[in-house]
Amino acid sequence: MSSLFPALAGSPGERVALRFGDRTLTYRDLASAAGATAARIREAGRVAVWATPAPETAVAVVGALLAGVPAVPLNPKSGEKELGHIVSDSAPTTVLAAAGDDLPAVLAGPARLDVDLDGAPGHGGGSAPKDRAADGDPALVVYTSGTTGPPKGAVLSRRAVAVTLDALADAWQWTGADVLVHALPLFHVHGLVLGVLGPLRRGGTVRHLGRFTTEGVARELGDGATMLFGVPTMYHRIAEALPGDPALARALAGARLLVSGSAALPVHDHEQIAAATGRRVIERYGMTETLMLCSSRWTPPDPRPSVRADGEPRAGTVGVPLPGVELRLVEDDGTPLASYDGESVGEIQVRGPNLFTEYLNRPDATAAAFTADGWFRTGDMAVRDPDGYVRIVGRRATDLIKSGGYKIGAGEIENALLEHPGVREAAVTGEPDADLGERIVAWIVPADPQAPPAARELADHVAGRLAPHKRPRVVRLLDSLPRNDMGKIMKRALPRG
């Protein structure tokens, strides 16, 4: 296959590839360091990567890909039990880490190899070796969040990585001239595949903030960066800071592309950012097993306010399927929806070269994840507009509520609740009800804990925006909502009623 990283071949130049704080690697530096790493692990089986937000993580993963060795990114914040399961299941022969990193005892088995950013003396004048693997060979084994059992290792092929990044490049007109800013963790698809491998495949630049701050975003976007990747909690902080931070507003206004993912971005945050900056945040949709499936397309802003660009971002949607992705919505019995009317809810099923190959060591789970004709069951529920735009309404397991004969997605109720000035955070679930089947429960973090909005007030607020049958029947107040590392609300961790 063609190289995953053309910019590392031949004679890499002095353009900056990676910047983590004050640590910078040019493409020549990266080719040397990743090439030296590749040479040291060429005969390894799988390699684990201690995925701290540091340049060593990027060098380790790129080195593994150059060597044709599957990389298993490890979350440094994982608990001992989860980490032990991942190491036992993936059986890496080597663990790559930055010198000085303290590794937990569960990683004592694999040989440790410290990543050297200086490369190796005499290593090819800075040129990286050619990729050795074939299209279908595994590139990464990324473990799922494990919300319904031990995490499963999704095996992602080199082809899946390449076609996903190329589809996003097409949708977003992403080129080597772009400079990406983000502060995402590097042990999952969003931060690692999109946020590091994406720019490197294009020949562009990654600037990693280490820790997210609105000051860091303003600084980097104000200093020539063109793109920002984030998750909804980050964009919510940006929206809250904008009224009192004109420098942040100017920096965002100058960005070419603002992208949010990993969870739905509330509509009111969309609108606040657009009003303050003139920039619409693009949402994209994907998951570990599928990489990216949908996105709005980027089009240059038109100075004429009456002009609506084809494919432009729409608040509350994740755009349209990317090139090469087949997507359908199905009923509970697997029958495809008869039509897309923007109201009917169905489970998303997908096919395409972007899909994972298998769950490592789990043929049973792999088989159960696909239909007989090869569609992957995502477990995500959505509606689709007649023109193809997709709106996610939640997970089948936690966000689909069947109440009074209606199928209701929790996501649209959460968005409606977040438009109420007395609501800071919101989550919606269903619980058994003898009359309705399930009743809608709203979990609210009030904007003012001393004066929370009344349950009736919130129910009327939702009913006025959506429909009466979508109003919450129960309101429970919390100090905060449980979230994972990506800012997703962990509904299974909510206290039982």
Image (cartoon, rainbow, N blue to C red):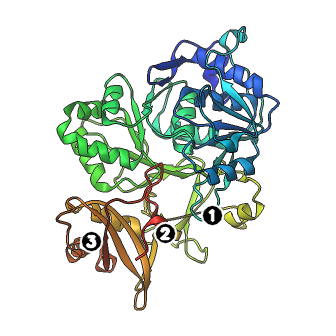
- Between label 3 and label 1, give the one nearer the viewer: 1
Mark 2 and mark 3: span between their CA atoms?
Answer: 20 Å
Amino acid marked by disc 1: Gly
Image location (x, y in percent) of residue 59: 62, 26
User: Would you name the residue on which mark 2 appears?
Assistant: 398
Q: Quadrant of the N terminus?
A: top right
Amino acid marked by disc 2: Thr
Assess disc 1: are there few (<14), some (14-19) or many (≥20) residues with their C-alpha within 10 Å of its C-alpha.
few
- Between label 2 and label 3, give the one nearer the viewer: 2
In primary-sequence order, the first of circles 3 and 1 is: 1
Image location (x, y in percent) of residue 230: 41, 42
Helix, strand or loop at disc 2?
A: helix
Q: Nearer the viewer, residue 15 or 18?
A: 18
- The residue depicted at 75 percent of the width and 59 percent of the height is 362
- The residue depicted at 23 percent of the width and 73 percent of the height is 464
Assess disc 2: are there few (<14), some (14-19) or many (≥20) residues with their C-alpha within 10 Å of its C-alpha.
some
> Is residue 213 depicted above or below 286 in this figure?
above
Mark 3 and mark 1: span between their CA atoms?
Answer: 34 Å
C-beta proximity under 8 Å, tags 3 and 1:
no
Q: Which mark is residue 228?
A: none
- The residue depicted at 75 percent of the width and 35 percent of the height is 69
User: Would you name the residue on which mark 3 appears?
Assistant: 462
Asked which quadrant contains residue 344, the reply is bottom left
- The residue depicted at 36 percent of the width and 35 percent of the height is 300
Amino acid marked by disc 3: Val
User: Would you name the residue on which mark 1 appears?
Assistant: 149
> Is residue 125 depicted above or below 209 in this figure?
above
Q: Is residue 366 visible?
A: yes
In primary-sequence order, the first of circles 2 and 3 is: 2
Q: Is residue 309 visible?
A: no
